[in-house]
Amino acid sequence: MDRQRPDAGGRGRGRGRGRGLFDPERARHRSQRRGAQAGAQAAERLAQLDGQEQQWQLRLGQYQAAIGSAAAQGRLAQLRDELFTPQEQLRLNAALALRAQSGAAAP
C-alpha cells in the first residue's frame, strides 16, 4: 500500500541541500534567478522541490536523532513507519550513510 502523507512541503531527494535554516531572502533571490532562466512555472516547481528536500532532510534528522537515543530504540520501527513511506524506507539507510559521509548533523 503506497500511502500519501499530508503535503506540508512533501518529500524530496536526499541530496545535501536544505539542511540549514530557511533563508527567505536567499529563496527569493533563487526563485527570481530561476524565473529569469527557465520561466515562472519552472521556478515555482523548483521551489516546491526545494521545500520537499527540506522536509526530507528534517525527517532524516528526526530519525537519525532517534537512532542515537536509547529511549527511542524500542520504537524505531514505528517512527520509521510514521516518518517515511514504504518507498522512502527503501533508500533510508543509503540516505543516512550519505549524511554521515558528508558530516551532516541532525537539525
Image (cartoon, helix red, strand yellow):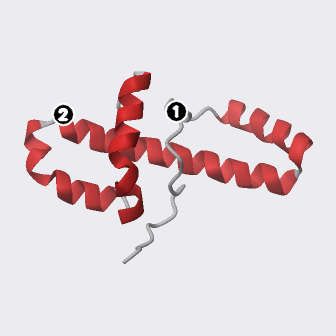
Q: Residues within 10 Å of mark 2 (few under 14, many from 20)?
A: few
Q: Quadrant of the C terminus?
A: top left
Q: Whole-percent x and y of residue 18?
A: 55, 35
Against 17, residue 14 (above or below) is below
Q: Whole-percent x and y of residue 40?
A: 86, 53
Q: Whole-percent x and y of residue 48?
A: 65, 53
> As drawn, which residue projects farthest toward the bottom?
1
Against 7, residue 68 (above or below) is above
Residue 24 visible here: yes
Residue drawn at x 39%, y 25% as measured from the top left: 101
Q: CA distance from mark 1 to mark 2?
A: 21 Å
Residue located beneath label 1 in the image: 16
> As drawn, which residue projects farthest toward the top?
103
Q: Amino acid at mark 1?
A: Gly
Q: Amino acid at mark 2?
A: Gly
Q: Quadrant of the N terminus?
A: bottom left
Against 86, residue 12 (above or below) is above
Residue drawn at x 25%, y 36% as measured from the top left: 65
Q: Whole-percent x and y of residue 8?
A: 51, 59
* Residue 92 numbered tag: none
Residue drawn at x 40%, y 31% as measured from the top left: 99
Specify which label sits upstream in the sequence, 1 or 2.
1
Left or right: residue 37 compared with residue 25:
right
Left or right: residue 40 compared with residue 6:
right
Residue located beneath label 2 in the image: 68
Residue 17 is drawn in which quadrant? top right
Instruction: Using the image as rendered, state which of residue 28 and residue 38 is in the foreground.
Output: 38
Left or right: residue 19 compared with residue 51:
left
